[in-house]
Structure formats: C-alpha cells, structure tokens
Amino acid sequence: EAKQETYQFKTEVQQILNLIINSLYSNKDIFLRELISNASDAIDKVRYKAETEPGILGDDTEFKIQLKPDAIKQTFEISDNGIGMTYDEVLENIGTIAKSGTAGFLEALEHAKGQETLIPELIGQFGVGFYSAFMVADKITLVTRAAGADADQAVKWVSAGDGSYTVEAAEKANRGTTITLDLKKKEKDDKDFTEQWTIRNIVKQHSDFVNYPITMEVERDEPLPDEEIIKDKDDKPIGATTRKVMREETLNSMKAIWTRHSSEVKDEEYEEFYKHLSHDWNPPMERLHLKFEGTTEYDALLYIPSKAPFDLFTPDRRHGIHLYSKRVFIMDDCKELMPEYFRFVKGVVDASDLNLNVSREILQQDRLVLNIRKNLVKKLFDLLGKMDAEKYNPFYDEFGAVLKEGMYTDPASKDKIAPLARYKTTKSDGKWVSLDDYVKNMKADQKEIFYITGDKLSALLNSPHLEKLKEKDYEVLLMTDPVDEWVVQSLNEYDGKPLKSAEKGDLDLDAVDDAKKEAYNALFGFIKGHLESDVKEVKPSSRLKDSVSCLSGNSGDMSAYMEKLLKASGQ
Ligand code: ADP
Ligand code: MG
C-alpha cells in the first residue's frame, strides 16, 4: 500500500508562491512557457545522460512534449519523456525554490569538463517556473518516473498551492513527467487554456523554437473512405463525406537556428526563419549571424529586409528584435536592443544570462543589454560599410532616410552614419554620391560642401540659387528627404569641410563689385518699398547668373523646404 505523506511548503516558498500567483506574472500565458521549458530541460538532461548510458532510453527514443487540454473536465495536461524524478528529487526540486535542480545539474556538468560538446543547452535556471502554473491552476498533480526506474517506482505530487503538498508512490507506464492542472474558474477577461487556438498561439509565440516537438491532438475533418459514404442510385453521396478525427499535430517549428553555427545552417533555413519572424515574403537583403563568447555571451541573428515596410515612419510601429534567453522567448519588439535608426532590422537576440522575468524598465538600464546593443550596432555599421555600391545603393534607396535620422537623434553615432549617407548631386546624373566622393571631387578653390534642400529633385536642379555655383563648376548636394533638414542642423561639417546651404545667407563666392552696388541702390530701395512686409532686405547677389532675382534666407533661418514641411505638419 502506497503511503501518502503531507509536507508543508517552506515559508519562503509559500511567500514566493503567493507573489507569483498574485503579482509577479501579469501575463498568465507564460505558465505554459515555463512548463514547456521544464519539459525541454528534462529531455535535454536525459539525452545528455544517454550519451554515457545508452541503455537508459530503452525504446522510448522519440522525444516529445505533449499537450492535452480537456474542455469538459477543465484540465490541462503536459507530458514529457524526459529524465523524470525520483521520490527524493521531487521533494528536493518541487518543494523548494531557489534550490534549482537545473542549477545543480549545471554544477555537476562543471565536473564533466572536456565533454563540452555533450553539454546540452539548458533552459531556465531561475527556479520559479514550475510555480507559475498556480496562476492558472487550483490544483497541480505531477506524476513522474525517473529514467531507469520501473513502472511502479513512479511518484505522485499534488498541491493546491495553499501551504502544503502531498507525495506518494505511484505507477506510470513510461519515463518522464506528466503534469495535470485543474484550471481555475475563468474570470471574465481570462483566456480559455483548453481552447486549441489559444494554446497553439501561446506555443507559437513563446516556445516556437524549443528543440523538441510540442504536440497536441487536434480535431480535423478528414474525408470518409469511399466504402463508408452512403450514395444514392446515381452514385451521389447522401449525407456526410467527411468525419471528425483527432490527429496529433506539432505546434512549434523547433528551429532555434540562431544557436547553431552559421556553417551548419542552410540559406533556405535562414530565409524560412526570416519569413516566420518578419511576415515578409521577400527574401532578406542581408543577414548577420553572430555568436559572442566571453563575459557577455549571446547569439544574435539579424536581418536587413529587402523592402521597407509600409509603416516604417509611423511613430508606434513595432521594432523587429525578439529577445530570448536560452531559446526561451522573453519579448518581441525589444526597442532596447536597437537604436531607432536601425528600426528596420529584424531578428533574434538570445542572451543566456538574462533573467526570464526581466521587465522593460529593467532592460533599459541593464548593462548586459546595453553591451549587446553596442556590439550589434557596431556589427551593423561594419556590414553596411563593407557593402559595395551594387549592394549598398538598393539598401540606401529603402532605408537611407531612416539611417540618416541617427545623425540628429543620436549625435554620438554621427561619425558612423555620415560616411554612409548618400546624396544625388548637380553632377551625379541621378546616382548616389557619398560625402567622401563629394570631397574628393571638390574644386581646388572650393572650401565648403554646398547643399540645397527641397522636395523635388528637378526643382532643385533648376533652382536659381545654384546658378553661380554651377558656373564655378561646384557640385551641390540635392537633399530631398524631409530628414535632411534636421541632418544638416547637426552635421555641420564633413572631413573638415563646413556644410553650407546654397540658398541661405551670403555665399562667399566672388565679391560683388561696390561700384555696381551703388548703381542699383535706388532700384533695391524701390523694390524693398513695395515688398516691405514680405522681405527683410533686397541686395545684390553673387549667387545668380542668368536669373534676375531669387529669394534667400539668413544663414540661421529655416530653409524654404523646412518652412513647407512645418506648414504641412500643421506647425
Ligand atoms: P528551474 O526550471 O529554473 O529549475 P522550475 O521551478 O521551473 O525551476 O523547476 C524546478 C525544478 O523542478 C527543475 O529544476 C527540475 O529539477 C524539476 N522539474 C520541473 N519540471 C520537470 C519535468 N518536467 N521533468 C523533470 N524535472 C522537472
Ligand atoms: Mg523552469
């Protein structure tokens, strides 16, 4: 006769339990992530053990994590064929917090030096995951059979999370652990965790890249075999031609390709993963697969899309970086990992030392995160800097305007971004020119980099402001992006050459002849008299060649284009 023992949770365990149930987790979905990650850990462990004890798996070698929701009984069951637990292990691992079995396992591995390649990746060393199930369950029943133990040596653990738990011997037909949750009565906004669609979505979002299949029996319509279809005399079916059947389906894609070595990942796999991540059906333009080792250990897989998304300039658009810790999803839209001017970059960062329950507020100040961000930005700049024109120009067509924002939103990165900026010029015949090329092509007597801003290239090309500059054969940058107005306010010079607006202030070209000036004074006075309220001053200009006059601002003034932009935005 199996004897049932009742144990009290340690005080601190019950305290943490209360904390978890009541406040720690605002998002109840993640109970599933935690249980799946424990199941995945358990399979990692038995796999690892089987490396030295091949017999231990028996014929139960197809690793998987099974989910069984039951809407009628209002239960949710998760089973794995991982390492399982002995009676003592259950007491040690499930009755305590902080004393994490995974951490202990890692310690044991320390002594198994020299076999690093065997060391499985372990998810979640944070020691509270299991208890998160009490967020959704009134009662948890865990039945487990350790690898190598007989069917009648299994253990059953039951608790309602109210201070105590019971443990007793049990029977279990196969190796591993089955956890059954008696679900709490739903409050009005709660999700129904017995609903297939809900479960499928949570798994997709939080556990898609778990390395083992996560399966669920799914109801499907399948065609009836021909002999079971009832037909009339014309051989037309009467009644049903399909039937409802339950089929086991794998819910996750299992592809944590970022943890693999790039030499082991095929191009198609990279592309497929990109599609999954971005919902963009065009193949990416570029990818960066990085493994950082040392004090900050993390994997990153970043993509540059080939096409800009339609919402690139809408303020609340989501960023493209998903954050993981050891293949367990933490959050998407992780703005903390990428500056705004790289918001078009998509990908995954998997940092092993990050706490799973980290909040956004903490992330912003997390040194590890800041470090990762710095490294990734550097790598992206390296990547862009190395592209040849054939590759880089199409990139710039799509994302140049976003990248340029960085020159004024993040002045510290100005020196990195300026060499990557491209402009069409009065001489480039519609092609992109870098500032380096511009400087290289400057005339011997030219001291400044001239630019003009506006929304139409054709209008800029024909601007009267440029006449004299054209005559002197000086090249002028034609800036047609709205952001350029802000860029030129922070980019005052490049390569020691000041940037100078061709339409504002005096151009220090050829001095205007004083005698000529005298001759026109009467005329200027006359014009000024007529335009009194519209112009500040009428004066001779060195800017013009063929045109009679042009409007121009003080060097500190807004450009005409800026005025137009501000008007358009209602300012
Ligand atoms: P952590 O996973 O961070 O160790 P958890 O609270 O999630 O913390 O789990 C506590 C411990 O319980 C695990 O370390 C593991 O030893 C044990 N455990 C939980 N779920 C399983 C399982 N499905 N199979 C085997 N052991 C498990
Ligand atoms: Mg865990």
Image: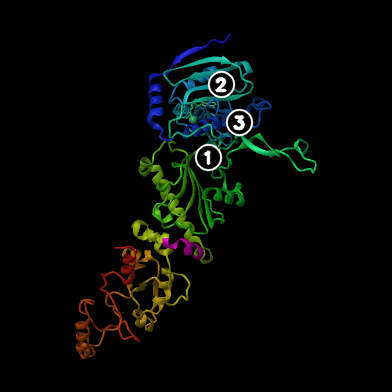
Whichever of labels 1 and 2 marks the residue nearer the N terminus, that label is 2
> Which is closer to the viewer, label 1 or label 2?
1
Q: Which residue is drawn at 36% across and 44% down?
A: 364
> Is residue 128 toward the left or the right of residue 116 in the image?
left
* Magenta residues, start to end: 393-401
- Whether the magenta-drawn stretch holds residue 272 is answered as no
* Residue matched to label 1: 201
- Quarter of the figure with residue 51: top right
Q: Where is residue 97 in the image (x, y as percent from the top left)?
A: 43, 24
The residue tagged with tag 3: helix, strand or loop?
helix
Q: Confirm or deny contact between disc 1 and disc 2 (CB under 8 A).
A: no
**x and y percentages locating residue 161 in the rendered image:** 44, 21
Q: In which quarter of the image is the C terminus?
A: bottom left
Residue 426, image x, y percentages: 42, 77
Residue type beneath disc 2: Val
Q: Distance between the residues labelled 2 and 3?
A: 20 Å
Q: Name the residue under label 2.
A: 143
Amino acid bearing label 1: Asn
Crowd tier of the residue under label 2, counting other residues whose Cα lies within 10 Å: few below 14, some 14–19, many 20 or above: many
Which numbered tag is attached to residue 437?
Answer: none
Eye-nearest disc, 2 or 3: 2
